[in-house]
Image (spheres, rainbow, N blue to C red):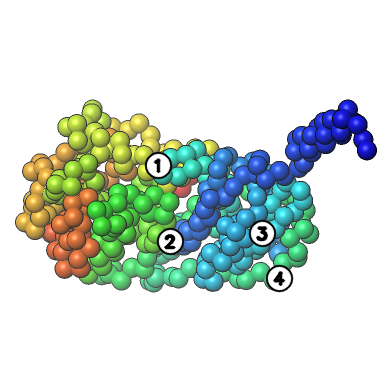
Amino acid sequence: MPGKTEVRIVSILLLLMALLGSMVMPGNAAESIQIAAARVWPAADYTRITLESSKPITHHMVMLKDPERLVLDLDEVELGVVLKALSDKINANDPYIRQVRVANFKPGVVRIVIDLKAEIKPQVFSLPPAGEYKDRLVLDIYPALDPLMSLLEQRGKPDTVATPLPELQVAPESPSIADVNPELPTEKAPALPIPGINKKPDARLITIAIDAGHGGEDPGAKGAKGSYEKNVTLAIAKKLKAAVDAEPNMRGVLTRDGDYFIPLHGRVVKARKMQADLFVSIHADAALSAQAKGSSVFALSETGATSAMARLLAQKENESDLIGGVSLDVKDPYLARTLLDLSQTATINDSLKLGKFVLDHVGTINTLHKRHVEQAGFAVLKSPDIPSILVETAFITNPDEERRLNDNGHQDKLVNSILSGIKKYFAANPPLAKTRIVEK
């Protein structure tokens, strides 16, 4: 029988061993980062993969060729059910991703291998908590070539018809998840699609950039009955494009045609690359009171907001980049030229004229929250040479207006009223000849 002293010593030794084991065990469950959600947003412009986590993730990315693959290593991340199911979220018709494989590469490292359909230029960045989101790691997969600019060049050629984007070739089977060698990642190069043109060749073609607010990671406002602003604005924007396309020598260009996020500056850049004559951003406002109602139209202000409500609304809309997710490290020379500190006085005056025509016509089918065009510093309206307005179609937080915003008949009335305002603006301000934008 051991004595009390020996039993006490053994107990102390066992306790010390347990404490030391918990300190040195790699990949300890208590220290592992938990992935709360994984979301995939495929689009013609780019595909985004978002990993939402309990704390920031240290990561390493490499690109591999023959076949094309992207490898993303995540440090101290637990390989849980969310990550294991990531491959199930990839659509078969994703423009860039063929498949995703996830496994433990070595102790403390989870490896994600993305088999690609073509050469890409990726961008990976971290986002701090914003809105209802925790920390996020964002991977944006862009095509290597910009199809928008190549198709724009074809527009200037005679007898040019609408040209579809080339089919992407599927890469051969990739090796196992561990058979990878590091290579340097490449830089971001955004790509944007361009619709076909089927108009009279002997008349000036008017291009209307139609911007469906929010999208993807950024849902916008939420209605009393669960509707998301991003879905309502996209439905109205698509209908407005169809109505514009049906007009002689007019065409609509959507900044987004699906449920994915476009940064605010990216919407401005796309409109300018398409040489748009007007920019119309569609939204559905939110308010603390469910009784707030009515439509509003806004233009840019360089000198401050025209009301406290306009200032707060612009502040809220400009926060979309924080929620939707934008890397601040992107160096875009086209963007730099777009957002130069140019005088926008003439453009703002035209925006106010356009806004007044649209507001008057919207007022025939809906209550107006304000009977005049308001102004504030909306980032999405900051094109120096395109008259731009933001239309708050209604308050989605008002149950009655939410119901009407989801009604096809009411959406059609909204679209017709906005288009009537646009046509009246051009009747009073005939479009001038456009100068082709030349990339330097």
Separation of disc 1 and disc 4 at Cα? Answer: 40 Å
Point out the tag, 2 or 3, that comes first from the N-terminus: 3
- Name which quarter of the figure residue 30 lies in: top right
> What's the residue at 25%, 61% (across, down)?
236
Residue 116 visible in the shown view: no
Residue drawn at 8 percent across, 43 percent down: 371
> Looking at the image, do the residues carrying marks 4 and 3 touch, with CB atoms under 8 Å apart?
no
Inter-mark Cα distance, 4 to 2? 29 Å
Q: Residue furthest front?
A: 1
> Which of label 4 and label 2 is nearer to you?
4
Q: Nearer the viewer, residue 174 or 247?
A: 174
Q: Mark 4 points at which residue?
A: 173
Residue contact at pointers 3 and 1, CB within 8 angstroms:
no
Numbered disc in front, either 2 or 3: 3
Q: In this view, does 276 lie above or below 13?
A: below
Quarter of the image where one finds residue 401? bottom left
Q: Earlier in the sequence, mark 4 or mark 3?
A: 3
Tell me if mark 3 has few (under 14), some (14-19) or many (20+) residues whose alpha carbon lies within 10 angstroms of its own.
Answer: some
Q: Is mark 2 on a helix, strand or loop?
A: loop
- Mark closest to the chain's N terminus, 3 or 1: 3
Q: Please give the label number shown on residue 102.
A: 3
Q: Name the residue under label 2.
A: 193
